[in-house]
Image (tube, rainbow, N blue to C red):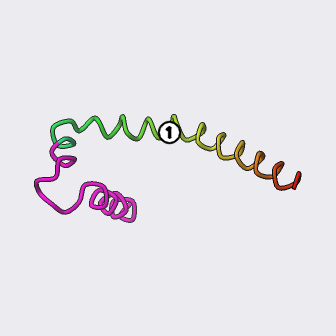
């Protein structure tokens, strides 16, 4: 649990930055539920990204096999 908290806090620092007047920091302080939307979109879009990756790999394999 402690490791999870450390990784989330380091991700927070990486995304938001250390500035106190960061626009992203202000936005997420005003709208704390928007984090859930960001994470939800990632989990919704991740299978599509994975599918596109496999399609690209198949296309490149076919192209390199044809050469």
In this view of the protein, which residue sits in the foreground, 22 or 41?
Answer: 22
Compared to 66, does 3 lie above or below?
A: below
What residue is rendered at 77% in x and 45% in y?
59
Q: Residue furthest left?
A: 21
In terms of image quadrants, where is residue 49? top right
* First to last magenta residue range: 1-26
In the displayed structure, does residue 23 sit left or right of residue 60? left
Q: Main secondary structure of the magenta part?
A: helix
Is 63 in the magenta?
Answer: no
- Point out the image quarter for the N terminus: bottom left
Total marks placed: 1
In the displayed structure, does residue 21 sit left or right of residue 54? left
In x, y percent, where is residue 48?
60, 37
Label 1, secondary structure: give it. Answer: helix
Answer few, some or many: residues within 10 Å of disc 1's Cα (few below 14, many 20 plus, some between 14 and 19): few
Is 11 in the magenta?
Answer: yes
What residue is rendered at 16% in x and 52% in y?
22
What residue is rendered at 25% in x and 55% in y?
16
């Amino acid at each position: 649990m402690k490791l999870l908290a450390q990784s989330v806090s380091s991700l927070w620092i990486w995304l938001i930055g250390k500035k106190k007047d960061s626009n992203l920091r202000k936005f997420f302080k005003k709208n704390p539920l928007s984090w859930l939307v960001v994470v939800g979109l990632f989990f919704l879009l991740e299978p599509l990204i994975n599918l596109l990756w496999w399609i690209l790999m198949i296309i490149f394999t076919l192209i390199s096999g044809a050469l």
